[in-house]
Image (cartoon, rainbow, N blue to C red):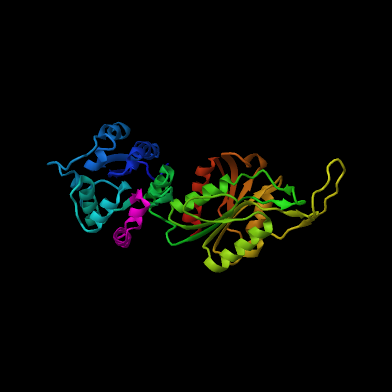
Amino acid sequence: MSYLSGKTIVLGVTGSIAAVETVKLVHALRRKGAIVQPVMSQAACSILHPDALTYASGRDTITRISGHVEHVEYCGDEGFSDLLLIAPCTANTISKIACGIDDTPVTTFATTALGRNMPVALVPAMHHAMFRHQMVVKNLNALIDAGIIVIGPKIEEGKAKIVAQDEIVLWCERILSQSPLSGKKVLITSGRCEEPVDDIRVLTSRSSGIMGQELALEAFRLGADVTIIHRDYVPFCENIRITTAASMEQAVQSVVKEKKPDIYISAAAISDFAPEKVPGKILSGQEVTIRFKPLPKILDSVLGTIPVIVGFKLGEDSITDAQALLKKGVTMVLANTPENLGTEEGNYTLLDYSGETRISGLKQDIARQIFQRIVTKHL
């Protein structure tokens, strides 16, 4: 079940051309189970017809405050909305909210929501020159100091663009998850390593990094400060790029020393061996003997330094190996199979002091189950 399931989100839309993206945003929020109530300024109505958001949300779009005092109904002290999300949010609206001016339906909702002290998030969208204006910057900082979450923007092509809808949804999930990992630092290693055989070739595995990425996203949803060491990119996390097992170990040791994480999840397919690299390129058409040297275990090097450590173990004797890791002091181990590599779904056996539990499904759901276990049993 999504953290947005059954939650009421008031979506305030203001007069940026990015308003045309909000139909897709409404659909994305509703797919996660949210109830979305659109509210539009008059400027927004000149860019996108309110009927478009009425159709997308299944609820009449509010374009004026009537005798029903809609702002109080949704965002007042007895209001039933869970989040006010203003996307896109113009420079004009940012400054009006910062100064307590409520002369549009959206700013009236914002004034009421801030008075109630309910969650408010805004997603700026404007030309970059406007976003750099010193008074806009000052007003935006004032809103942040008041507890408003600011999502984005994405700076490109001379514009401060609205961020991707998936990233907005991700932030909404974080805000409404109750943030059980707020203040916690999570370190995750993910994906495959590549060990050079010669100047051209590498030795690697079939690991896609999907599990590690889903774990990082779930940790972010739950309010954590997330660092992920891998080859890819996960939004709103500190991404440290690596190639070899040695560079991954160096990155882990650096993060452990500097950040002192509360949780470390070793979801990477870290190389167990490294070939003795041959200078240049091994010529084709001939038999080749490659010598391998064993590599140290990164997990062993952090035992006793991080309160919660989660490992993954793959192989024919993964259950036995996982039990051995528990005896060494690892908090939780996921016994893995080769069939899980590179797939969106997986089947694992979770082992900790409580015993063994089979978990399966989409890796996003598995990541949630792993963190549920951490939050309820190990923090």
* Residue 314 sits inside the magenta stretch: no
Residue at figure coordinates x 43%, y 62% from the top left: 183
In-image side of 319 versus 55 (left or right) = right
In-image side of 252 versus 220 (left or right) = right
Q: Position of residue 19 (x, y in %)?
A: 32, 41
Q: Quadrant of residue 283?
A: top right
Q: Position of residue 46 (x, y in %)?
A: 25, 37
What is the magenta range?
Answer: 122-150
Question: Of residues 312 and 227, which is closer to you in this image?
Answer: 227
Query: In the rendered picture of this protein, how many numbered marks are placed on residues?
Result: 0
* Residue 136 sits inside the magenta stretch: yes
Question: Is residue 189 depicted above or below 357 in this figure?
Answer: below
Whether residue 357 appears in this view of the structure is no
Q: Position of residue 34 (x, y in %)?
A: 35, 40
Whether residue 223 appears in this view of the structure is yes
Residue at figure coordinates x 77%, y 51% from the top left: 198
Q: Quadrant of residue 27?
A: top left
Residue at figure coordinates x 16%, y 43% from the top left: 65
Most extreme residue toward the bottom is: 257
Question: Of residues 124 and 327, which is closer to you in this image?
Answer: 124
